[in-house]
Image (spheres, coloured by chain):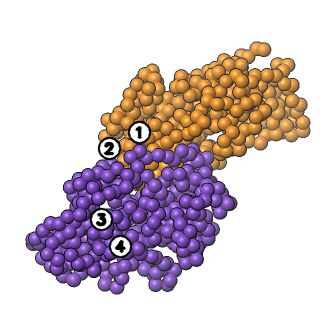
Chain colours: A orange, B purple
């Protein structure tokens, strides 16, 4: 066990992309374990766009994360010592409450034990919050029917790549929007997307018109902004827009758009936000189904590993410039410090 | 019968508010009636914000109205001569196909016969497209439950004032947003709204926070723009936003906002557009129910009459500056020309 507890702490609210003066790397004592508590050592930490919202100071679906807190994150850890009967030493556990640090003490609230048969590197990419988000966001909010045209933005991202594949399984024609030729190639060749649009080199509105001649039945939105406007301009009558997030806006002080919301009236369309939190009681349904598809080879994923806790916050900005490939995860298992 | 057919024709696409160079008043011959056709004399013509969209040149839920056409409008007329068995002379008929003119010939497509017991001045205010819009927009899309907080913009308008009253009948707390003290007074005193906000003199976001301490469960939107942003900032979890229209934007070349769509995610809220056209097959349900409430004194309405076809297009702009009080209708019954 490491003698010290390395931590990333929010010291200042960022403007634009996060930098080293906003979230600082430091050390603290390893906290003591009391009755009905256990000590967790983080093994893998998930980097997600929504973390940028938590530190923005805005009221979101949570109150703003206070300046001074250890950075909030989803993570997977191992129980190192325990005075809690439900969390034995050696168990793999997952939570949003462990923070971006080596160690923390938990009383078990909001903590799940990961079944031993789940490979840890698939946890964040297919199961956990990503899989539950993709599964219910598409099926519950998007209501796909065979033959529907499904468009996904952030399509090569963790949620987007799953959404597209679930759409294919349900019989949809799937068009993915991503930011590099390599990502578009991966979506088409490996994941079976029917068409892709590179939003950095192509006119998205025009290409949506070409690739969706009957209009978009479902637009699964991860990004907001101009791409949402382009999708609104190409809806079919009765379209559904599950709103997962608006990555394009998270680093902005003033959010903008969309400008053509009247398309919701013209096309009698529905735009609906959702949060994974509301689906946690139904998590098992998603995980069972996703696990089945994974075993049958119907779902593929990729994980981009960032080595070492010290590299975490530099890597974080890769979520916003289109650089990351697949689920971005910080691996602490080989950390020596 | 008048010897000539007076008409308003679109001669140029307007920029901003419509003026006399965009839509011109002229005369034409009265058209001939052929087999399976009938001649209609317009008695009442409805002025509606959505007409501004039709002439904008934009694709909306209809293709753009061509320059040169007689201005499209909803109207009520009387059959003056007939070679069609379903439309006898003397019948009162309603349609969106008669145009802003004295006379037209119809083959009956898209024409309803108004039952003799319906007073004509209630037709546009309570029945017809206004009533069907309010009834299904609130009940089908808004899904009100007793105890819900319902906010209506354009609350003193034809649709808005009905929506608020139907909300009250369904047990909602109703807050209306309107543009004059007189309208707010009418909503509270005569229609039983629980609270009102004068958007021209009050801070809407702040007043929504005050008047909706538990958040907005249903925001029935007639106006879009800044008021929509203010409503988004005050939603309750699971809120519904029936989108009826965006009057605040119709005269603009570049539409704007809303800027805080992320609130749909934060509050797991649903925004859904709808069109009265889709509910025409269920019109009888709405009209029966609305007629019942009208007879029981549970629904009140007011109609602002514009006298004479020649005054129609000047009056039209009253829909956009908050000047009109209740359903705006052009009365041709006393026209002499």
Q: Which residue is mark 3?
A: B73
Q: Residue at x 77, y 25 (%)?
A: A7
Find the distance from the CA under tag 3 to the CA under tag 2: 30 Å
**Neighbour class for label 4 at 10 Å: few (<14), some, many (≥20)?**
many
Q: Looking at the picture, does residue B105 appear above or below residue A199?
A: below
Q: Which residue matches tag 2?
A: A214
Same chain shared by disc 3 and disc 1: no
Mark 2 residue crowding within 10 angstroms, few (<14) / some (14–19) / many (20+)? some
In what element is the residue under mark 2?
Answer: loop
Instruction: Locate residue A62 relative to residue A84 in the image: left or right.
Output: left
Residue drawn 32% across and 57% down? B19
Instruction: Write down the chain letter for disc 2.
Output: A
Q: Are marks 3 and 4 on the same chain?
A: yes
Residue annotated with mark 1? A230
* Chain label for disc 1: A
Q: Secondary structure at mark 3?
A: loop
How far apart are labels 4 and 1 at the CA level? 41 Å
> Residue at label 4?
B306
| Mark closer to the chain start, 3 or 4 | 3
- Residue at image location 49% in from the left, 63% down from the top: B154
Quadrant including the N terminus of chain A: top right
Q: Which of disc 2 and disc 1 is earlier in sequence?
A: 2
Q: Looking at the picture, does residue B51 appear above or below residue B296?
A: above
- Mark 4 to mark 2: distance in Å? 43 Å
Q: Residue B75 in the image: x percent, y percent?
A: 29, 71
Q: Toward the viewer: A318 or B68?
A: B68
Q: Are marks 4 and 1 on the same chain?
A: no
């Amino acid at each position: 066990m490491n003698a010290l507890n390395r931590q990333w702490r929010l010291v200042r609210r960022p403007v634009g992309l996060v930098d080293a003066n906003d979230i600082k790397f430091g050390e603290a004592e390893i906290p003591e374990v009391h009755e009905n508590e256990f000590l967790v050592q983080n093994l893998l930490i998930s980097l997600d766009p929504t973390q940028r919202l938590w530190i923005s100071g805005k009221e979101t679906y949570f109150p703003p994360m206070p300046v001074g807190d250890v950075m909030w994150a989803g993570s997977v850890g191992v129980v190192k010592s325990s005075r809690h009967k439900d969390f034995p030493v050696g168990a793999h556990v997952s939570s949003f409450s462990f923070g971006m640090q080596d160690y923390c003490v938990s009383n078990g609230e909001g903590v799940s034990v990961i079944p031993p048969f789940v490979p840890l590197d698939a946890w964040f990419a297919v199961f956990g919050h990503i899989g539950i988000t993709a599964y219910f966001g598409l099926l519950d909010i998007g209501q796909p029917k065979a033959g529907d045209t499904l468009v996904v933005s952030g399509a090569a991202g963790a949620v987007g790549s799953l959404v597209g594949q679930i759409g294919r399984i349900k019989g949809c024609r799937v068009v993915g929007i991503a930011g590099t030729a390599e990502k578009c190639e991966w979506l088409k060749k490996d994941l079976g997307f029917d068409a892709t649009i590179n939003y950095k080199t192509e006119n998205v509105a025009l290409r949506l018109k070409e690739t969706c001649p009957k209009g978009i039945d479902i637009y699964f939105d991860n990004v907001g902004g101009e791409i949402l406007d382009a999708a609104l301009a190409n809806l079919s009558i009765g379209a559904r827009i599950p709103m997962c997030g608006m990555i394009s806006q998270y680093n902005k002080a003033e959010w903008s758009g969309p400008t053509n919301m009247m398309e919701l009236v013209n096309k009698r369309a529905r735009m609906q936000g959702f949060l994974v939190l509301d689906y946690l009681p139904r998590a098992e349904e998603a995980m069972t189904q996703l696990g089945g598809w994974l075993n049958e080879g119907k779902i593929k994923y990729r994980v981009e590993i960032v080595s070492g806790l010290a590299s975490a916050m530099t890597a974080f900005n890769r979520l916003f410039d289109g650089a990351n490939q697949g689920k971005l995860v910080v691996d602490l298992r080989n950390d020596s410090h």
